[in-house]
Amino acid sequence: MKVRVETLARTTIVIPEGRLDFGAAANFHVQVDQALAGAGQAPAVLIIDCASLEYISSAGLRVFLLAARGAQRSGISFAVCSLHQPVREVFDLSGFIRVMTVHPDRSTALAQLPGTGA
Amino acid sequence: MKCRTRVRSEAAQLPALAKFLQEFWSAAALPPAQSLAFEIALEEIFMNVVTHGTPAGSHGHVDICLTLEEGSLTLAVEDEGPPFDPLLLPSPDTHTRLEERRVGGLGVYFVRQLMDAVSYARVGPRNQLRMMKHLER
């Protein structure tokens, strides 16, 4: 699985692409942790954009949970956006949809989060 | 239609299992939108066997069988590890706050939610987990 990271001012967007299964979860976790830590300065906003995510299992979901908690501890606004079926279905089943901020697409996420300069 | 495969009980086999399912799906011309339950079940149950059912340092095997008949698909996962019924795992509380959420047990919970019927049996030295779902064509 490929993970891209985009930075706009103090907003960091992590973009997992493909299948986030058990085998891909460890690398994704490293990428998310690096994004949370920032380059010397933590971001104000972390968005995980799932537009290119095709599949997620409980191993992948765990990283979202750790990211949400890590962001909360560091005072970073955290959101998830662009969930397609079947990823959306897994988020629904897990109940994560109720404890995380989920936006339909990236532009909505950027417009609604504080400090994104939108 | 029936297809079987046997893999070593190790996490590195996961891509091969995903491919096995994908090939079965294509060969049987099943609707792609309905594969989620089986993708999840294959990964979650297989990884359960790898982590809970395989004694450290040993590499047992896991047998996977897909059977399509009369509009329903059954996934059977069998291993020779110690007796382990994943259906006895407590369901996670999916309504707690972020700080209290846990991921343990979520995989098996997904399988129970996504499948129409799930059953466990210990047959001789083997764990057998069967998961069935009716497919809409």
Image (cartoon, rainbow, N blue to C red):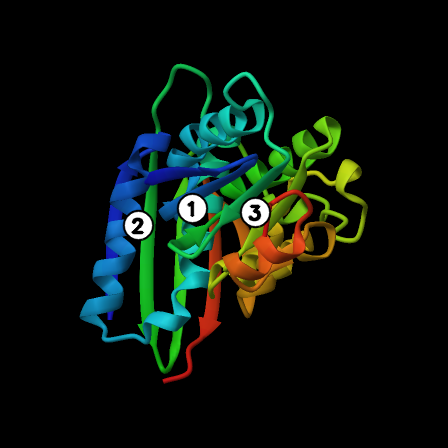
Pinpoint residue B25: horizontal percent, then vertical percent: 27, 66
Give the amino acid type for the residue marked by disc 3 in the picture: Gly
Image quadrant of residue B3?
bottom left
Q: Nearer the viewer, residue B100 or A43?
A: A43
Q: Residues within 10 Å of mark 2 (few under 14, many from 20)?
A: some
Quarter of the image with the N terminus of chain A is top left
Q: Residues within 10 Å of mark 3 (few under 14, many from 20)?
A: many
Q: Is tag 3's residue or tag 1's residue first in the polypeptide sequence?
A: 1
The residue to which callout 3 is attached is B107
Q: Is residue A46 visible in this depiction of the protein? A: yes
Give the amino acid type for the residue marked by disc 1 in the picture: Glu
Image quadrant of residue A93?
bottom right
Q: Using the image, name the chain to which the residue with label 2 belongs.
A: B
Q: Is tag 1's residue or tag 2's residue first in the polypeptide sequence?
A: 2
Pinpoint residue A115: horizontal percent, then vertical percent: 66, 42
Task: State how far apart marks 3 and 2 are (Cα).
Answer: 16 Å
The residue to which callout 1 is attached is B43
Task: State how far apart marks 1 and 2 are (Cα).
Answer: 8 Å
